Image (tube, helix red, strand yellow):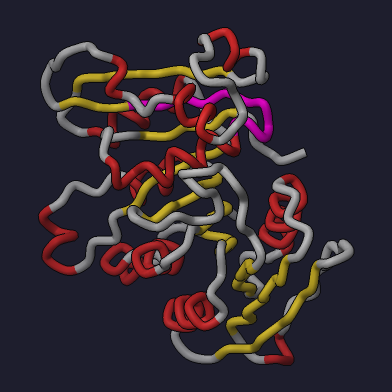
């Protein structure tokens, strides 16, 4: 069983977020869970909830539901859907307020990966929301398909990258990566473990074994972010799974934590697990 049933997905109704929505919906169907979609408007707008990503047409396209299905047909899948529209000047604060009273097990967030001046002039939502909720978070870069096809709903998870260090210990990331691959029915997976440190300091961990799965361990020196991004590109990975400790120093506050910096450069989804 995957360790999440309640999934929270913020949306701005844009086409660029369709991939994150597809991942959120696929995982909700997989665990027969509850998907909450939330949109925050700066002013009162029209109350046409069809602005929210439409679930039944997408499930019909995936072959999960027949064309012209009713709302009750979604419930018969064991899935609960909630749509929330709020009015606030600060989207992150409004979402955090909701999550305080209705906690989530997993955030699925679309990221726009802005840097430099563009980052300073746009209000960030994904990183602050993940950091302040301390929830497991799946970041899906805007415009990247990821391991769930938006068009067909099919899964493509064959290469997973897991950065490992002593602190925080990587075992939860290794276990969750394996649980996710198993739940998604991925029969042939290469798990690339990148140890960011000296080979003699490699932490002890257990690798879940399945027929068709393989595990490789690499040792890296230098900037962790550069190594993770380079390894992700070189191995053409479908998912990065890593532990995160948030901001531990003033330097982190200025540049962002290792996880946040990887999120800004990764070209595949990243699953972050709070230590």
Which quadrant: the N terminus?
A: top right
Answer above or below: position of 100 versus 227.
Answer: above
Residue 180 image point, x, y percent: 69, 50
Q: Which one is in front, 221 or 215? A: 215
Answer above or below: position of 114 versus 135.
Answer: below
Residue 35 image point, x, y percent: 52, 26
Residue 216 image point, x, y percent: 73, 80
Range of the magenta residues?
28-38
Residue at 60% x, 38% y is 27
Q: Is residue 88 left or right of residue 111?
A: left
Which quadrant: the C terminus?
A: bottom right
Residue at 68% x, 57% y is 177
Q: Is residue 42 left or right of residue 109?
A: left
Residue at 83% x, 67% y is 212
Residue at 45% x, 57% y is 246
Which quadrant of the structure image shows residue 257?
Answer: bottom left
Answer above or below: position of 194 versus 74.
Answer: below
Q: Is residue 244 left or right of residue 111?
A: right
Residue 164 image point, x, y percent: 64, 73
Q: Is residue 35 magenta?
A: yes
Q: Which one is in front, 268 or 256? A: 268
């Amino acid at each position: 069983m995957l360790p999440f049933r309640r999934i929270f997905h913020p949306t701005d109704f844009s086409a660029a977020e369709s991939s994150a929505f597809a991942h959120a919906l696929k995982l909700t169907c997989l665990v027969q869970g509850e998907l909450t979609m939330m949109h925050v408007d700066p002013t009162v707008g029209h109350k046409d909830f069809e602005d929210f990503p439409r679930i039944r047409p997408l499930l019909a396209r995936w072959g999960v539901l027949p064309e012209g299905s009713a709302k009750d047909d979604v419930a018969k899948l064991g899935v609960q859907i909630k749509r929330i529209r709020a009015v606030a000047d600060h989207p992150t604060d409004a979402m955090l307020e909701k999550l305080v009273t209705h906690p989530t097990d997993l955030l699925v967030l679309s990221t726009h990966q802005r840097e430099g001046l563009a980052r300073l002039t746009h209000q960030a939502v994904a990183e602050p929301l993940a950091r302040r909720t301390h929830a497991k978070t799946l970041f899906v870069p805007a415009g990247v398909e990821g391991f769930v096809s938006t068009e067909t709903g099919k899964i493509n998870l064959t290469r997973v990258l897991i950065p490992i260090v002593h602190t925080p210990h990587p075992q939860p990331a290794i276990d969750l990566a394996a649980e996710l691959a198993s739940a998604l029915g991925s029969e042939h997976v290469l798990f690339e473990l990148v140890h960011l440190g000296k080979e003699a300091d490699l932490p002890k961990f257990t690798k879940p074994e399945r027929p068709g799965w393989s595990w490789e361990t690499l040792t890296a020196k230098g900037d962790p972010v550069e190594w993770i991004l380079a390894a992700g590109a070189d191995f053409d990975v479908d998912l990065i799974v890593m532990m995160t400790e948030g901001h531990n120093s003033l330097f982190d506050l200025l540049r962002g934590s290792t996880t946040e910096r990887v999120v800004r450069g990764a070209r595949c989804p990243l699953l972050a697990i709070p230590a």
